[in-house]
Image (spheres, grey):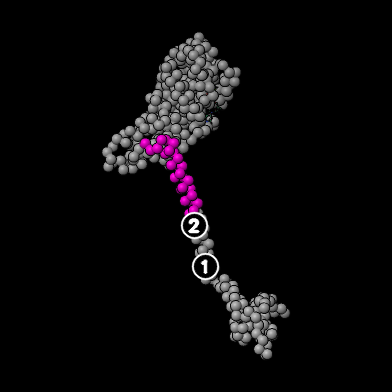
Amino acid sequence: MRIKKFTGRTEQEAIAKVKEELGLNALILNIRKTKPRGIFSLFRKPVTEVTAAYADKDGKKPEESNERLAAATSEAERLAYEETDDFKRQRDKIRSLEEKISSQEELLNKLMGQLSLNEQLYRSYSLRKYDNRVIQVFYDTLVAQGVTPDIAEKVLEDANAIDDESRIDIKLVSTIVYNTIINILGPAEPIELVKTKRTRFVVLMGPTGVGKTTTIAKISSILMLYHNLKVGLITADTYRIAAIEQLKTYAEILGLDVDVIYNSQDLENHLEPIIDQENDVVLVDTAGRSHRNQENFKELSEFLALIPDSTKYLVLSLTTKYEDLLSIANAYSVLTDYKLVFTKLDETSCYGAILNLCYLTGKRMAYITNGQNVPDDIEVAHPEKITKALLGIGGAHY
Ligand SMILES: Nc1nc2c(ncn2[C@@H]2O[C@H](COP(=O)(O)OP(=O)(O)OP(=O)(O)O)[C@@H](O)[C@H]2O)c(=O)[nH]1
Ligand SMILES: [Mg+2]
């Protein structure tokens, strides 16, 4: 057996030379790339060197010749092909297809997850209530927002009563549901931003820690700074030492005095001079009271009876458990008429309690608060915004 070396710019070229000179029976022993040497090596490309064995003159033939050469040839052809632009284009195509497939898979998994979640929801609501899928979706959305199932049913009554043919009109069904909710919420009734000759008293009442004092600070700042109204402040919260200081701190920033009222007699004595100050609006802070404490409630009732021409705001935190909200609203209904202020919307993603309470009490909303910042985190309640949030339309947030 003899050995011979062949070189080429590529393996393919070198092997082609082997085949040409030694025939298919030549045996490829080694393939290697060699770096050019010498003074001009920088300007020369590397070459491929193929070492081949072939049968010597006495007729001895190299073993395994055919297969190995064929294999080496196809390997060399493969490697050479991998260097071509065509190969690279195909490879990139395959890679991007693979990426697409994996993100489609992700999307599908997500959808499947949602579908099975809906399936679970249907099951937990004792299956579907409505044949009409659109109405069913509204029902599910409202209930997920914390609207009670019976109020959600009431809301959907009109939409569900239209004839079968119209019920497939998604736009019509949506319009009916939307308007029904807007009607239940009714227009907001905040403090009127006009100067009148008389002093208007606005009393904030409600459970402890819901944000009465903070809301008074927000409202008085807005009335004074943005609407140029003359504002007076009274606090009847003398239960906690810090309560008076809390309101006084805000009052000082606004350049206002706070009248502190200790009892009904005190209020009677203070009223005349307060009215004489010719304020447009006097905001009255009260101590947080548990609606279950009858003694406290009696005291508040006597206090309210003494204030002339007053609007009462029942301040409710949206973080309070719904059943408690309901019994608080009921307890205050017995005491007096009121409008609703909802606080701490920033701490919940459920708007359902607002609809439930407006529906059950028939009271109007005044303000919604959504944070601790004075005066920014307050807005006049906005029925359209709340309705959109309840129906999960367009990320309506306060
Ligand atoms: N996250 C959030 N916190 C609020 C909001 N309104 C008030 N707070 C916070 O709730 C806490 C209680 O607020 P207060 O204004 O003292 O509540 P109050 O109803 O006057 O409390 P009492 O006088 O003790 O009955 C404070 O830490 C406020 O900053 C609101 O809209 N969102
Ligand atoms: Mg307070």
Name which residue type carries label 2: Ile
Q: Nearer the viewer, residue 328 or 16?
A: 16
Q: Is residue 282 magenta?
A: no
Q: Which mark is residue 101?
A: 2
Q: Is residue 368 above or below residue 239?
A: below
User: Is residue 105 on the magenta stretch?
Assistant: yes
Q: Residue at x 68, y 90 (%)?
A: 58
Q: Earlier in the sequence, mark 1 or mark 2?
A: 1
Q: Residue at x 45, y 19 (%)?
A: 331
Q: Which residues are magenta?
A: 104-129
Q: Is residue 255 visible?
A: no
Give 273 or 362, whichever is nearer the viewer. 362
Q: Which residue is mark 1?
A: 89
Residue type of the residue flagged with mark 1? Arg
Residue at (44%, 35%) from the top-left corner? Answer: 145
Whole-percent x, y for residue 7 in the image:
65, 81
Q: Is residue 299 above or below residue 202?
A: above
